Image (cartoon, helix red, strand yellow):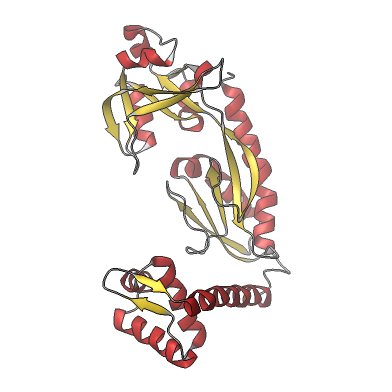
Amino acid sequence: MDRFQAMSMLLRVTDKGSLSAAGRELQVPLATLSRRISDLERHLGTRLLIRTTRKLTLTDAGIAYVSAARRILEQVEEAEREAAGEFTAPKGELVVTAPIMFGRLHVLPVVADFLATFPEINIRLILVDRNVDLVDDHVDMAVRIGKLPDSSMVATQIGVMRTVTCASPALLAGHGVPLKPDDLTRFPCVVVDTPMPSSGWRFQSPRSDATLEISISSRLAVTTTEAAAQAAILGVGVTRLLHYQVAEPAKRGELKIILERYEPVPAPVQLVHTSRGQMPLKMRRFLDFAAPRFRQALNAITSSAPR
């Protein structure tokens, strides 16, 4: 029995919550996965998982073993990286993730310059509008916009990002310019469909810092932020997006930012990675190279339309 392989399979099963989900991700037949874990339990002489038709539950022995196995595999992975020279020379593959539009506009140019500077480092850039699990998906570094819920992450702040409300000059000419959030109730709006949709937009009172939630009339719902910005440019309705998503059309005069006094507190933008001991040189080089360039890009967005 390959004990390291069995440990890895057990961790994937517990992280995914089911044998079938783990089998699909590992591309291992369900029978093989079940047999490997049974072999591990037989080797240890104890039961690690309680399996029912509805869910998997770790036994007390399983909880302790999974915790120990996770530490062991992380140490093995770190030893392999050190043996490969990742701690003595900047080389190897670096996996970076970012939101789709932010990645295309701001991360990709930095990555291109970085690759030209460090020829022995390759990058896999994952652009996706969800928070990828850095440990499960083996991601080295992520760009995150918003407060971090996980305190185990090491974060380097590279700027802040406003949430702005905007509309085309033509729409505002026809409906008037809203002076307070309540005025939006008489405007058609463009919204972005999300896994947790909301019937309203949140603003902040400039006098009391109280949160104001305004019900809006969704004239058009789209699945991407780029489509929402384009629909607003075409005069379909008012939309509400992160500032970088509309900075260029606002600069060109295709969109006008409104209700600036009522914007919520800008969200932090951060480069994050997991805190797992010594950082490989490829990660340190990318952090040192990318952070000042991202700060410069974010500062340029902020200064392009002062509040």
Residue 65 percent coordinates (x, y)? 52, 79
The residue drawn where x is 39% and y is 66% is: 16
Q: Quadrant of the C terminus?
A: top right
Q: Is residue 306 left or right of residue 258?
A: right
Q: Is residue 269 above or below residue 17?
A: above
- The residue positioned 36% from the left and 81% from the top of the image is 33
Q: Nearer the viewer, residue 267 or 190?
A: 267
Residue 233 in the figure: left or right of residue 60? left
Residue 59 lies, in percent from the top left, at 44, 76
User: Which residue ends up furthest to the front in the rendered image?
Assistant: 60
Residue appearing at x 33%, y 37% in the figure: 197
**Residue nearest the observer in this picture, 226 or 206:** 206
Q: Is residue 156 placed above or below 281 in the rendered structure?
A: above
Q: Outermost residue toward the right?
A: 88
Residue 211 is situated, as x and y percent measured from the top left of the image, at 48, 24
Above or below residue 132? Residue 21 is: below
Return the residue nearer the eye: 199 or 159.
Answer: 199
- Image quadrant of residue 182? top left
Numbered marks: total? 0
Give the residue at x 50% y 32%.
Answer: 244
Give percent across and percent down for residue 268. Answer: 59, 38
